[in-house]
Image: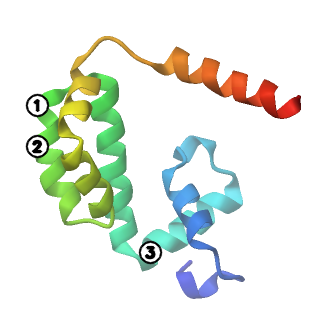
Amino acid sequence: MDCDSLSRTLSARTVARLMTISRDDLSKSQTATVAAIEGGVQQLVDARDVIAAFQAMIRKKSLADLEPWLGRARSSLVAAFANGVIKDRTAVSAAISSRWSNGQTGDQITKHKLVMRRM
């Protein structure tokens, strides 16, 4: 299956979502669509690999992987994201190396905003 065999044109947002969802969470038709995209646009495959490497670096708390990742990311489709990481390198480094997280705070803020909207 190639990109020409897709029956409709996908939006950039849809392609981005499909390329960042775990393969285990894709439906059969989504898997076929991703395979067609991968067959036609190698840069998207590379970008997905760069994104997956970033997620792994954050999860493993591997600060040593940041510089090699930045070098790889700067030459990919996620170069704008990499430039943002460079601008906030101190914060990103702290997020990777710190054992603390503001996840619970973010969840509380989101819940508070939801309650306020309902009012």
Pointer 2 or 3: first along the chain: 3
- Where residue 30 sits in the image (x, y, percent)? 65, 60
Which mark is drawn over residue 39? 3
What is the secondary structure assignment of the residue under circle 1? helix
Residue found 11% across the figure and 43% down from its top:
67
Give the residue type at disc 2: Glu
Indicate the quadrant containing the C terminus: top left, top right, bottom left or bottom right: top right
Q: Nearer the viewer, residue 112 or 103?
A: 112
Farthest top residue in view: 99
Q: For mark 2, does the 10 Å Cα neighbourhood hold few (<14), some (14 to 19), or many (20 or more) residues?
A: few
- Where residue 57 sits in the image (x, y, percent)? 27, 33
User: In the image, is residue 16 above or below residue 91?
Assistant: below
Q: For mark 3, does the 10 Å Cα neighbourhood hold few (<14), some (14 to 19), or many (20 or more) residues?
A: some
Q: For mark 1, does the 10 Å Cα neighbourhood hold few (<14), some (14 to 19), or many (20 or more) residues?
A: few
Q: Is residue 46 left or right of residue 116?
A: left
Q: Which residue corresponds to mark 2? A: 67
- Where residue 79 sits in the image (x, y, percent)? 27, 62
Q: Which residue corresponds to mark 1? A: 64
Kindly report which numbered mark, 3 or 1, lies closer to the viewer in this rendering: 1
Residue found 36% across the figure and 44% down from its top:
52
What is the secondary structure assignment of the residue under circle 2? helix
Kindly report which numbered mark, 2 or 3, lies closer to the viewer in this rendering: 2
The image quarter in which residue 72 lies: bottom left
Q: Is residue 106 left or right of residue 53?
A: right
Q: Is residue 75 left or right of residue 40?
A: left
Indicate the quadrant containing the N terminus: top left, top right, bottom left or bottom right: bottom right
Contact (Cβ within 8 Å) of mark 1 with mark 2: yes
What is the secondary structure assignment of the residue under circle 3? helix
Farthest bottom residue in view: 4
